[in-house]
């Protein structure tokens, strides 16, 4: 039986079933009958591609219509990745490591000297053991990610990716080209660094505005996962804002990172330094750390915190950061209660590990700030769990005059300080 005959048989059968239904149930509940007829015909003609049908006043919508918002979302993700993936690079770390060779050994060397004399100097041939002879060779020891921020070869990455000053770094671009990279600057405060490769006409990313990040919005991470899967894409949401985390870098030394964005977009070893995107394909963060004892908890530095470093490198060739010159601890309600302090939030100026609370000749010292002062606001912005003093200072430029609100022994006052260039080693 050909296809046309099958269709006619189905249609005639459907008409008979509908007629029987009307005979059985009579004229009552016409809307219910219409719904039943509509559902029947939708199922009947589904194999033949029917999408919608209308019986009476009842319309049936196809699944394709319900899927449309999901399709739009997927298209946005794909478009964002296609737009920025050409700007994402893999960074290879290489070092001169000792060459291990097989050297002849005395198989009796562990015996006491009195016993060794019985064996003389004629050792069995072919007895060797691994040893070093002073020779070295360049060998790949790690990798990370980065992204192009200017068409003439500037690349932004994490400081911990390029922390070894004795290592050499190679950049592999999305089109398969390899370049030797020079580390132009390492940020003294943030986990950021800028590299330079000798190339022009490169595709640069579009930097977004991280101040507008909202909980629940889509986040797209791209990077060199595990140091071997370049341009790996993972998608999630923004899970948290203004987090403070303690991370361990390549040296194992713990480092506190403040004001980072939390995301559940998978960030794996090797993703460090790669971009975190929004659905418009704009970079809103720099992937920097992952919680190793959790499932999909990663962290990124908001891109607005990196913009001043980028501009500083473009203008001066180095990352110059503003410096106030105070050491402090962020206040909490518990600390305020334990110390009987007049306020429960702010930055308590306090020394640590033998270092002074206020550095001599610093902008803070010149402004008259003292140990024990509580800095409660900067330029009218309250200092609290979401607005750390260091973060607020970093958003300004060297030479900016800032206004600080201070609580000193319960008395409120206002001082002004002119931010200076951070001294080396601070």
Image (spheres, rainbow, N blue to C red):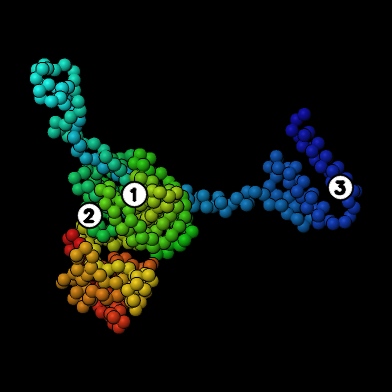
Chain-order first, disc 3 or disc 1 = 3
Residue tagged 3: 21
Image coords of residue 101 (percent x, y): 19, 27
Side (left or right) of 242 relative to 393: right
Side (left or right) of 413 relative to 99: right
Q: Residues within 10 Å of mark 1 (few under 14, many from 20)?
A: many
Q: Secondary structure at mark 2?
A: strand
Side (left or right) of 113 relative to 76: left
Q: Secondary structure at mark 3?
A: helix
Report the quarter where the C terminus lies: bottom left
380 or 258, nearer to the observer? 258
Q: Residue at x 82, y 52 (%)?
A: 33
Chain-order first, disc 2 or disc 3 = 3
Residue 185 badge: 2
Report the quarter where the N terminus lies: top right
Q: Residues within 10 Å of mark 3 (few under 14, many from 20)?
A: some
Residue 9 badge: none
Can residue 89 be seen in this snapshot? no
Work out whether 267 lies above or below 346. above
Work out whether 122 lies above or below 324. above
Can residue 177 be seen in this snapshot? yes
Residue 272 badge: 1
Rounded to the nearest whole Å, what is the CA distance between mark 2 and mark 3? 81 Å
Image coords of residue 378 (percent x, y): 31, 74
Q: Residue at x 78, y 33 (%)?
A: 5
Q: Secondary structure at mark 1?
A: loop
Work out whether 61 lies above or below 326. above
Q: Quadrant of residue 228?
A: top left
Rounded to the nearest whole Å, what is the CA distance between mark 1 and mark 2? 17 Å
């Amino acid at each position: 039986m050909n296809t046309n005959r099958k269709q006619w048989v189905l249609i005639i059968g459907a008409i008979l079933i509908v007629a029987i239904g009307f005979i059985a149930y009579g004229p009552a509940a016409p809307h219910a009958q219409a719904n039943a007829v509509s559902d029947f015909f939708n199922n009947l003609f589904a194999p033949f591609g029917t999408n919608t049908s209308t019986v009476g006043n009842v319309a049936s919508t196809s699944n394709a219509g319900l899927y449309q918002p999901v399709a739009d979302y997927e298209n946005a993700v794909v478009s964002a990745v296609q737009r920025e993936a050409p700007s994402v690079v893999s960074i290879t770390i290489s070092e001169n490591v000792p060459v291990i060779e097989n050297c002849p050994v005395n198989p009796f060397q562990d015996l006491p000297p009195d016993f060794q004399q019985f064996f003389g100097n004629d050792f069995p041939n072919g007895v060797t053991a691994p040893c070093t002879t002073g020779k070295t060779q360049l060998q790949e020891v790690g990798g990370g990610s980065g992204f192009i921020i200017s068409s003439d070869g500037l690349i932004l990455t994490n400081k911990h990716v390029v922390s070894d000053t004795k290592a050499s770094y190679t950049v592999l671009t999305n089109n398969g080209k390899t370049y030797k990279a020079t580390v132009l600057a390492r940020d003294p405060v943030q986990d950021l660094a800028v590299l330079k490769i000798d190339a022009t006409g490169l595709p640069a990313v579009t930097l977004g505005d991280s101040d507008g990040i909202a909980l629940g919005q889509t986040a797209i991470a791209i990077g060199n996962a595990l140091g071997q899967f370049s341009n790996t894409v993972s998608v999630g949401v923004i899970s948290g804002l203004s987090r403070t985390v303690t991370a361990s870098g390549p040296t194992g030394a713990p480092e506190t990172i403040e004001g980072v964005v939390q995301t559940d977009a998978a960030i794996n070893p090797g993703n460090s330094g790669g971009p975190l995107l929004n659905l418009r394909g704009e970079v809103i963060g720099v992937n920097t750390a992952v919680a190793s004892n959790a499932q999909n908890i990663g962290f990124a530095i908001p891109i607005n915190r990196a913009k001043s470093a980028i501009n500083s490198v473009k203008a001066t060739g180095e990352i110059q950061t503003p410096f106030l010159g105070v050491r402090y601890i962020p206040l909490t309600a518990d600390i305020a209660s334990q110390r009987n302090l007049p306020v429960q939030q702010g930055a308590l100026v306090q020394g640590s590990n033998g270092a002074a609370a206020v550095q001599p000749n610093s902008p803070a010292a010149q402004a008259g700030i003292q140990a024990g002062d509580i800095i409660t606001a900067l330029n009218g912005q309250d200092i609290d769990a979401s607005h750390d003093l260091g973060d607020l200072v970093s958003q300004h430029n060297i030479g900016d005059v800032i206004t600080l609100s201070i609580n000193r022994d319960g008395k409120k006052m206002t001082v002004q300080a002119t931010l200076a260039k951070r001294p080396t080693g601070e």
